[in-house]
Amino acid sequence: MKKYFLILLAILLTLSGFPQKPRIKNGIIYKNYQAIPRVDHESSVPLKNSSFRYFPKQRNFAGQPNAVTVLNLGTSSNVLSYSGGTRTMLWADDDLNCVVNIHRMGPGATPPSLSGYLGMDIGLNMGKTQADWTTQVQVYAANLSASPNYYDAARYPSAGIYNPAGNTTLSNAFLAYFAPNFANLAFSGFGGYSYGTANLLDHADTTKHLKWYSPPPYTFVPEGFTVSKTGIAHMVNLSKNAESGTDVYQDSVIYGRGIWNSVTKDFDYTFRTLAFPCKEAAAAADCKIATSPDGTVVWISVLTNWAGANIGVAPLIDSTYYPLLRRSTDCGLTWGPPIPVYLDGPLGISGIKNHYSDYFIQNFFVGPPYPSRDEIPYTCAFDHSLSVDKWGNPHIGVVVGYAPGGYSISTGVDSLLTVYDINSPTHGASWCAVAMGSLTTFRGTWATYTSDNRTYISRNKAGDKMFLTWNDTHIDGEINNQNPDVFARGVDLITNKITLDNGLNKPNNVTLLSDIAQEAYWQCSSPYVFTDNNKFTIPICTQWFADASADVTFKYIPDFSFEQSAFLMPSDYCWFDSGRGNDPGLEIPEGNYLPCYGVAVDQKPAEPELLTISPNPADDKVKISVYLKREVMVDIEISDLFGKTIKSIRIGGTGMGLHTEEIDISGFAAGVYVVSVVVDGERMVGKLVVQ
């Protein structure tokens, strides 16, 4: 008997040496979302007669404070024009003061194959007013008829403006577009490409090319597309074989490289495959491509789960998504090896692993003992966006959250998901994560159509500022992203500071009080912003519909911007070793730098916490403690999430050390409040939950 007991004890001790998956506390309501396969089998006949009807709640807040302008652009025959993830549909050019939106055609034009045509809306003068726009400009026609479909019916387009460096004349600039088609109906699904150009001034000056899938590599829906001012276009597409009716990833992407032909006014493409290995055939979720401002450095990012056997350490759960990148330093001619970006475990990014506070971990997970930050598994969501800064470093805009396993992500709990700018200041040798905003919801569903947060990342022309936008629904009790607004935040890569919303540590709600408040469906942002001195305007477009299977209208926001003065809060971008500073352009030898810390407030080491709020949650009284280094004036302000001040207190002549102020909150309504403490001009921000 003793022998069996010792064997059992040995087994238990052995098992205890392996990290255990953290367990969620009973009673916490949350949802697991899995990746939905991209649309790959679709009739070219417009979808009609849906029994689904979404009840609109459009408002008329135009002209009121904080309300952005909303302009009507073109239309599409159904919501699928912006579907399939964060592709490049909107593009702004700072030198032309021009912005273009590409989409499938809709009402307002009468071609015989409406659903298979592509059109653009073009806005001059930054598209500021309705009069600056010309909509429904046809750039592509499907004309290879085979009833009831068209062989060359185009879908899900991406596009960008090719404007040669130094040019400011519209007639010398072209829209370059790229889209999938029905591959000559060789099999029931996508498998061909439609691509070409359209002059921005002479709208009759267009080109059209078709490429069928056969022979392999198998083409699919291109999700990455960009154009540089050097005259090179780049396309990237997950290579999938769908002939069996099931998408089988081929462990590679198809890379299309187009060179501008000044005689034909077109791009001459060559295509090749690039290896992006994956653990399982169905576990590649999304791909993107972007270039540096000078067009020399090109990055490709794929959301996958390559175990990286040569790396030595794998993620905590093998059924998760994380970015896998490759870099070219010669405009896409040659490519370096795959670089995995692990989110968790020993090789995980500190800014992600340390984002959950102690309070959150102890209230969400079962314990004690509570899981350490190296024991919590993380995963990317299923869409992402990519940009490259002026130093040739990649920036990934993506949602990251708790990974329950099975290629799924959990939500339904406030702050469980976070939007990050995941970036490398060392060309892939090390990685940082800047938290831009926590999410309340994840996926919205309208009839049979779904859309996630749609995180986009944009940059200014110089490449020293990044701006992220996304969809989220902020309605009490709502756990689905059915009524989204657009949220935005920026990061300055020189000062390493992120924007504040009226002094509060949160992203801006772009569409609050606008005509499309809580109806800013399926947002899309340009990869480039307009820059006017110290003002940065982010071009943003959404789809609006009453019935997702019927006609949709594109709604453009021309006047949401950040001033330089909004970049106030240190981003904890990256802490390098002493003497080197924190310029992300520095070349730092591997092993000679410190990781990036995005540590939650209650996790900061070394000195006393500057601001604490306890108890939290509270229901009667709350103590706000401030650690002061000298005798100063202190202002405490409690406001709601809309910025309305609920209570304010001024304390004068407070001495050095820890000062605690007890505040009566018995009259506060239950909810989340923002506590702002201003000490000698410096603002500290915390969150208070009132029960």
Image (cartoon, rainbow, N blue to C red):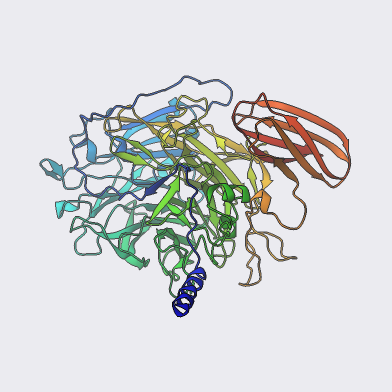
- What residue is drawn where x is 63% and y is 67%? 587
Q: Quadrant of residue 631?
A: top right
- What residue is drawn where x is 42% and y is 59%? 320
Residue 390 visible here:
no
Quarter placement of the C terminus: top right
Front residue of this view, candidates 33 and 153: 33
Tell whether 344 sits left or right of 617: left
Rendered location of residue 519, percent (x, y): 42, 29
Front residue of this view, candidates 532 and 389: 389
State how many labels appear: 0
- What residue is drawn where x is 34% and y is 46%? 84
Rendered location of residue 603, percent (x, y): 67, 54
Tell whether 276 sits left or right of 493: left
Q: Quadrant of residue 370?
A: bottom right
Q: Is residue 106 above or below residue 423?
A: above
Front residue of this view, candidates 167 and 394: 394
Rendered location of residue 562, percent (x, y): 60, 38
Q: Is residue 70 above or below residue 383?
A: above
Rendered location of residue 280, percent (x, y): 33, 64
Tell whether 251 sits left or right of 141: right
Residue 491 visible here:
yes
Looking at this view, name the residue that lies furthest to the bottom: 3
